[in-house]
Amino acid sequence: MIKYRLLSIFTCFLSIGLVINVLPTFAIYGGSPAIGNKVVVGLLSSEVATTSGCSGGLVAPRIVMTAAHCLTSTANNLWISEPGSDLRDLSKKRIQAERIYIPEGFTAAKFPYQNDFGIIVLKSSFENYETLELATSQQIQDWMSAEAEVLHLGYGCTALVDTPPCQVTSQTPNQLKTTFTNAIPQQFATLAPKTFSATKISVDKTICGGDSGGPLLKKVNEKWIYIGAQSSSNGAGCTKTCNVDCAATQGLPAANITMVQAAIELVASKSAVSTPTVKPVVKKTTITCIKGKIIRKAAGINPKCPTGFKKK
């Protein structure tokens, strides 16, 4: 079974100084705080933004995976927060995006979104990161069949609402343990097989607006595996009602390996250091040589007079 370990391929309103003394709000409703998590990041509209509209997962020092529907702006207008940070803490590092990737033909005009997965390549690296592998398509299918346990992370809205969208998103990250679902609700029957995964949610434990793009992770043998980016839900996403078989879907890197490889190659090419060829600077000198009344000039790096001539 092939695993895609990114790092091996690479060889691979608070101001600064103030103490944060507030209880974190639950963005992933019914979840728990995830401050300090080394994977979850916020997608920001500027270097000094203190709220995010979408979340993402730092899978390698310069690569963030998220939902394609979150990437509606240009790379220059997108900044990524230090993983696991409180967005009000401007002492934490923020890095500007260099390039974004979304699947060819992707559109957010029709719900649910087909192949809702995107990649952000950053201009520089984060030092605070988790070593991750990418789940293969077969692993995901097996885990869905077994309804295995998984972990959602994100910076989403803070309360249930009567109808979407919810309002202010959380400035701190949160997490929610749940399981895959083996029963795909009818609302997601139009999605292409093996391009998405689906997890169970409810009114009491759900993901919200702002959690879009947030990472879905699974721990195997004490190592975290990245599965996909939060895409959509079919009724419980921070609303007060939910139909039977409530679920959330995630876009998958396993369905976009060519795009993943393109992002990796871009990072690798930028990381390569070339040593320029430097030629030494040498100066030529000219001397005067004499033989009787005959005078000649000799030039060169170390010029010498011809035979029979003497240096004047």
Image (cartoon, rainbow, N blue to C red):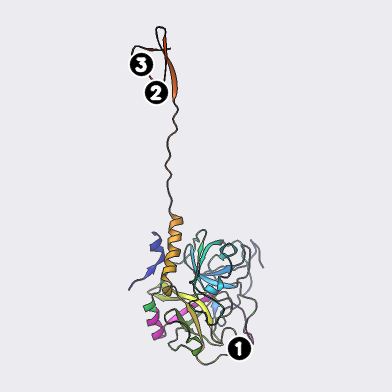
Q: Position of residue 96 (x, y in %)?
A: 56, 61
Which mark sits nearer the N-terminus, 2 or 1?
Answer: 1
In three-dimensional space, the C-alpha distance between marks 2 and 1, rounded to whole angstroms, equals 90 Å
Amino acid marked by disc 2: Asn
Between 190 and 213, the residue placed more toward the observer is: 190
Q: Is residue 158 magenta?
A: yes
User: Circle 2: is it few (<14), some (14-19), or many (20+) Cα within 10 Å?
Assistant: few
Eyeballing the image, is 251 above or below 62?
below
User: Residue drawn 44% across and 84% down?
Assistant: 180
User: Residue drawn 42% across and 80% down?
Assistant: 194
- Label 1 sits on a secondary structure element that is loop
Residue 240 disc label: 1
Q: Does the magenta stretch include residue 100?
A: no
User: Residue drawn 52% across and 92% down?
Assistant: 244
* Discs 1, 3 touching: Cβ within 8 Å: no
Residue 306 disc label: 3
- Label 3 sits on a secondary structure element that is loop
Instruction: Write down the quadrant of residue 311 in the picture.
Output: top left
- Give the quadrant of the C terminus: top left
Eyeballing the image, is 87 above or below 273?
below
The magenta-colored residue range is 140-164
Amino acid marked by disc 1: Lys
